[in-house]
Image (cartoon, rainbow, N blue to C red):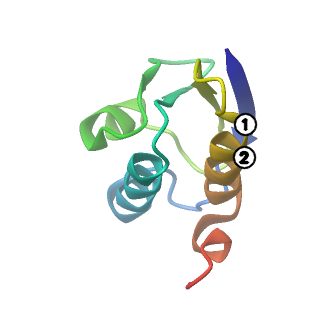
Amino acid sequence: MTERRVTVGWAEGLHARPASVFVRAATSLGVPVTIARPDGPGPVNAASMLGVLSLGAKGGQEVVLASAADDAGPALDRLAKLVAEGLEALPDA
């Protein structure tokens, strides 16, 4: 299992629009990824909008991204950057 721990950099946390951007990115990666709050519910499928919203991750909270896929490192790095930096992490933002 490969993991990345990252602090949510979106001021509003992972809800509504930020969660939608995150879920689209997770879906596009082609590897199964979960996201969890160490102090809360989870893990949930990172490609599930309802799952991500159910975490209630707020700005400044830590989340754990994980995958059992052999080639998950680059995918997790990309998602971790998106969670930490928000839209600034997207190439066309």
Tag shown at residue 92: none
Q: Taking 8 as reference, is 37 above or below it?
A: above
Q: Position of residue 27 (x, y in %)?
A: 38, 48
Quarter of the image with the C terminus is bottom right
Q: Is residue 7 left or right of residue 18?
A: right
In the picture of the structure, the residue carrying the numbered disc 1 is 73
- Type of residue at label 2? Asp
SS under mark 1: helix
Q: Taking 46 as reference, is 84 above or below it?
A: below
Q: Residue at x 60, y 51 (%)?
A: 59
Camera-side residue: 64 or 29? 29
Q: Position of residue 67 (x, y in %)?
A: 58, 24
Q: Are marks 2 and 1 in contact (CB under 8 Å)?
A: yes
Tag shown at residue 77: 2
**Residue lying furthest front in this view?**
70
C-alpha distance separating marks 2 and 1? 6 Å
